[in-house]
Structures are given as structure tokens and as C-alpha cells.
Amino acid sequence: MRKLSASILSADFGRLADEVRAVEAAGTDWIHVDVMDGHFVPNITIGPDVVRALRKVTHLPFDVHLMIEKPERTLEAFVDAGADWLGVHVETCPHLHRTIQNIKELGAKAIVTLNPATPLVSIEDILPDVDMVLIMTVNPGFGGQKFIDGALPKIRKCRQWIDERKCSALLEVDGGVNSDTIDGLVAAGVDVFVAGSAVFNGGDYVKNIKVLKDRM
Ligand code: DX5
Ligand code: ZN
């Protein structure tokens, strides 16, 4: 049941369609799309038109991670473009309940995401309403960063909350997931593992994905 979501942030952006086909053939379960606006995070990446173009090359679920201010303005565009799972950061959503309901009304699965310094209590009330919680294990904005060990207690606590409260939410992590960190994440009860550089670096996607999936 555990899933690997390959983050195309670490792919060759000049050959994105081929890269998506290649990681699908290599065995990833989902495609993770990092959307950055240059405001909430320093980097700028992908918009709905790119998601729409990639939608034509794979049937794998798209797990779209919005690292943008005022995400409520673009939910419809991303779902229309082909996002199956759509995630917003709690730090960007003053009306989080409304935003999560909007994502679900649009027909996508709703993800709430927390930065490393954001306490779990900030999503306590929305937990029964979301389809997945994404706990960042790096500060968002770039691939290839070092895993923040201090995120592990939060991940364990979130697993405990989901189980105790009988919520249906999956638990996802993003940032620094690799062969050194994945065992601790499995033990902490993670369901969905986002990996960018651990999938794409070195170019042997079959081997890279096998290394991760053998431990999941
Ligand atoms: C970071 C992104 C991640 C990134 C992870 O802001 O949200 O999805 O691609 O990259 P790695 O796996 O290299 O840490
Ligand atoms: Zn991401």
C-alpha cells in the first residue's frame, strides 16, 4: 500500500515528457509536481499548462504540491489540468477549511502540507477532512537538501493521531528521502514517500527506484 511519488523537480526540464515516461517505466507509483511561485518559496517552477501537457503522457496519479501564496486562486486550473491529488500549505491558507472543501468539490483529493517549523497542532482540526497530510522534511523550495531529523517526532505523532482518531488520511513526507533516511520513515508509519534526487540522480531510474521500493 505504500507509494513512491517521484518528484520531477529533479528531472531534466528540457525533456520532461520523456522523464515522466521513464520513471513510470522504472516503477514509480505517482508523479509529484512541485509548483513554486517565487514568493512563498524563492524558486519558480511549473504552472497548470505544464501539468496539462504531462497529463497526456502518463496515467499515473499526479500529486501536485502547491508552494504558492493565495493557492485558492489556482485550484480549479490545476484540477482541470489533471491534478489527482492537490496540496496546499497550511502557512498560506487563512481559510484552510474552505480551501480544502474547494479542492474536494473540484473532484481532487485534498492534501494539507506543513513546513518543518509548523507545529502539528495547526492541522489538528482539519485532519478529519483531508485525504492526506504532507509533512515537509526539508524547507521547501529546492531539491537535494538534507533531511531534517527533527521532523521525525512530528511524523510519528501525526501517525498516532490518524490511527487513534480513525481518520482516513494518508501520511506523506517530502524532502531528503533516500536510502539513508527511508528506514526511519517507514518505521514512523509513512504511507507516501516523495523522492526527487534519489530517483533522478545518476540516471539509472530502475535501480534508484528499486533501492527505495525494496525498503518501503
Ligand atoms: C522541495 C520539493 C520536493 C523536492 C524533493 O521543496 O517540495 O518535492 O523535489 O527533492 P529531494 O527528494 O531531492 O529532497
Ligand atoms: Zn514537493
Image: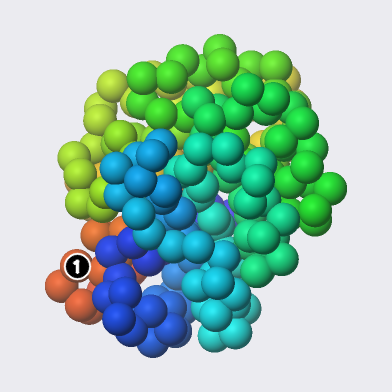
What residue lies at 42% left-to-right and 48% top-to-bottom?
37
Residue type at tag 1 = Asn
Q: Residue 112: x and y, percent?
A: 59, 35
Occupied quadrant, residue 139: top left
Q: Is residue 138 above or below residue 75?
A: above
Residue 41 horizontal side relative to residue 166, left or right? left
What residue lies at 54% left-to-right and 55% top-to-bottom?
64
What residue lies at 50% left-to-right and 63% top-to-bottom?
47
Occupied quadrant, residue 195: bottom left
Instruction: Report the front residue among 134 and 35.
Output: 35
> Residue under circle 1?
201
Number of marks in the image?
1
Q: Is residue 13 above or below residue 190?
A: below
Q: Residue 58: x and y, percent?
A: 56, 81
Q: Is residue 195 above or below residue 128?
A: below
Quarter holding the N terminus is bottom right
What residue lies at 18% left-to-right and 40% top-to-bottom?
146
